[in-house]
Image (spheres, rainbow, N blue to C red):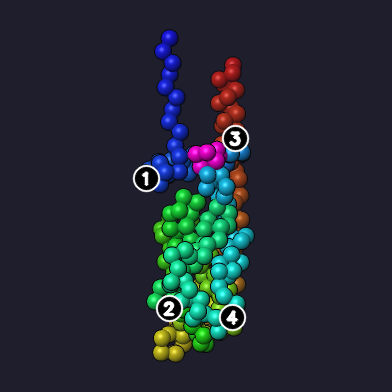
Amino acid sequence: MKQATPPKILNEADLRESPQLKGDFVVALKGAADAGKDVKLDPQFYPKLAANPAHPLEADAIPAALSLLPGGAEELPEFIRRLEGSAIQPKTNFCGYTMSAGAEDGDIIFTINDPLDFPLGYCKVDLQPKEDLAYMAYVRGGVLGDHVGGLLHRVMIGAARKYGISKVTDLPTNPAVLVWLVREGFHPEDNRGNPLPELDRDMRRLVYEGGLEEGEEKRRKYSEAQEAFNEERRLLEKTRQSLFMAKKLE
């Protein structure tokens, strides 16, 4: 009797080469986790994933990013020169993701990669020893886009606080981001040192009139409702699976 050929086991190299396979792999893992199954990856085939299982970014991300910065503003020029002259950039792993720091034209670049080394986003920070902090972020579209974007904003805030910087320039002109910065004690300005025009309108509406708190409350209630919906859907799916198995066993 001819033996069946065993299925090929995908490895990390296969997943890197095929976005389709990577997507199917992630969906399968997520489905197993949502079903309450413990997923253990064989380190022989998935060394990086097995060593650093993916979890939400929040717990260690900001301390990890700030640990890549030097201790004080007076050390920055030497720090940037050292980065630009080195082929190996400082990296730190957290929850399977990698935050690395590099330098480009005098700016420090924070980059976030996922467990398969795909770039999720980057944050460019000008930390010259002066009063202002210039900042720019790019986040790749996708499932983690908003989450990583918020993380990079908080990394920037943490860096500014570490150096005692209160003025922030070159920010996205998103009113919610601007209002958040002002409430955190920063002074967003344009490149000419003028307060951003959005502040005159949105600060009064969102801060002085309490609209920001109202918006935060709405987001909290929406998040709670979404979680309740997801839990109900998980229970419904488990019920369906139980009924299906019971039918099969009749």
Circle on res. 72: 4
Q: Earlier in the sequence, mark 1 or mark 3?
A: 1
For the record, the magenta segment spans 41-46
Where residue 186 sits in the image (x, y, percent)?
55, 82
Q: Earlier in the sequence, mark 3 or mark 2?
A: 2
Which residue is found at the position 55% from the left and 61% from the top?
92
Q: Earlier in the sequence, mark 2 or mark 1?
A: 1
Q: CA distance from mark 3 to mark 4?
A: 54 Å
Q: Earlier in the sequence, mark 3 or mark 4?
A: 4
Q: CA distance from mark 1 to mark 3?
A: 34 Å
Task: Identify the residue position indicated by label 3 in the image.
Answer: 238
Circle on res. 106: 2
Please say whether residue 146 is visible from this viewpoint: no
Which residue is found at the position 60% from the left and 72% from the top?
213
Q: Amino acid at mark 1?
A: Glu
Q: Earlier in the sequence, mark 1 or mark 4?
A: 1
Q: CA distance from mark 2 to mark 1?
A: 34 Å
Secondary structure of the residue carrying tag 3 is helix
Displayed quadrant of residue 138: bottom left
In this picture, is 143 found above or below 8? below
Q: Main secondary structure of the magenta part?
A: loop
Task: Identify the residue position indicated by label 1 in the image.
Answer: 17
Secondary structure of the residue carrying tag 4 is loop
Who is closer to the viewer here, 9 or 167?
Answer: 9
Q: Label 4 near label 3: C-beta < 8 Å?
A: no
Judge left or right: residue 61 versus residue 109. Answer: right
Taking the magenta stretch, the answer to whether it contains residue 45 is yes
